[in-house]
């Protein structure tokens, strides 16, 4: 009897192991990209150096690395905008998640049409986190805000008004440049 029980346990354990392996082997439900950007806005510490985007089933996560994410500034404000294109048939982005780059500044998700914000700020799930020790700005937008598109692409722009008379602008890879389309997976 003991032997049978043991065999059963062994078979159950083996079954669980196989199930675990199958789970690990499942395709990741996300498509990612990551690309560098030149040090072409050296007048600003917030010069965009790298953009990584991950389009998951439940959310979009974008990380933007800058030269030096200084959270305190004795000059004018700096800001960053993440543009999200979810619809090929409509020109320009459908959403913009904008944020200040200093501690205590706010962020806001708005709908866009023809590169202009329309309507009130959205209250669906989204977040911006300033990760100073990694010089990284982390954007998250939940699928509910995106409308669960099969594919999307993103663009990033930084504006630094430290010296108000000489604003510094840096677009990832160039003005209104987009990443490639990223499938939801
Ligand atoms: Ca740059
Ligand atoms: Ca569009």
Image (cartoon, rainbow, N blue to C red):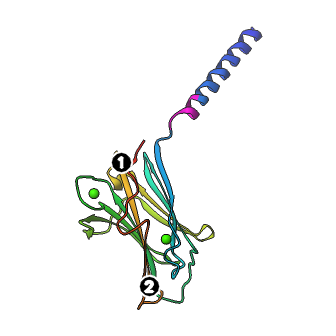
Nearest the eye: 47 or 24: 47
Name the residue beneath numbered marker 2.
161
Name the residue beneath numbered marker 1.
151
Q: Secondary structure at mark 1?
A: strand
x%, y% of residue 114?
A: 23, 66
**2 or 1: tag closer to the N-terminus:** 1
Quarter that holds the C terminus: top left
- Relative placement, left or right, of 5 versus 55 is right
- Relative placement, left or right, of 179 versus 120 is right
x%, y% of residue 47?
A: 51, 74
Q: Are marks 2 and 1 in contact (CB under 8 Å)?
A: no
- Range of magenta residues: 22-27
Point 58% across, 70% down: residue: 135
Q: Secondary structure at mark 2?
A: loop
Other-residue count near label 2 (Cα within 10 Å), few / some / many at <14 / 14–19 / ≥20: some
> Please, what is the dominant secondary structure of the magenta stretch?
helix
Q: Is residue 29 above or below residue 35?
A: above
Q: Is residue 14 magenta?
A: no
x%, y% of residue 21?
A: 61, 29
């Amino acid at each position: 009897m003991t032997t049978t029980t043991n065999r059963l346990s062994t078979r159950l354990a083996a079954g669980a192991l196989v199930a675990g392996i199958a789970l690990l082997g499942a395709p990741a439900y996300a498509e990612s990209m990551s690309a560098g950007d030149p040090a072409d806005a050296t007048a600003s510490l917030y010069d965009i150096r790298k953009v990584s985007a991950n389009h998951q089933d439940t959310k979009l996560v974008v990380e933007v690395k800058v030269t030096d994410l200084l959270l305190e500034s004795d000059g004018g404000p700096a800001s960053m905008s993440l543009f999200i294109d979810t619809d090929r048939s409509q020109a320009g982005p459908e959403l913009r998640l904008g944020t200040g780059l200093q501690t205590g500044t706010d962020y806001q998700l708005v709908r866009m049409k023809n590169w202009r914000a329309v309507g009130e700020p959205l209250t669906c799930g989204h977040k911006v986190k300033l990760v100073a020790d990694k010089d990284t700005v982390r954007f998250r937008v939940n699928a509910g805000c995106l409308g669960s598109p099969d594919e999307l692409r993103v663009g990033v722009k930084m504006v630094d008004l430290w010296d108000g008379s000489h604003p510094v602008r840096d677009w990832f890879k160039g003005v209104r440049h987009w990443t490639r389309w990223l499938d939801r997976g």
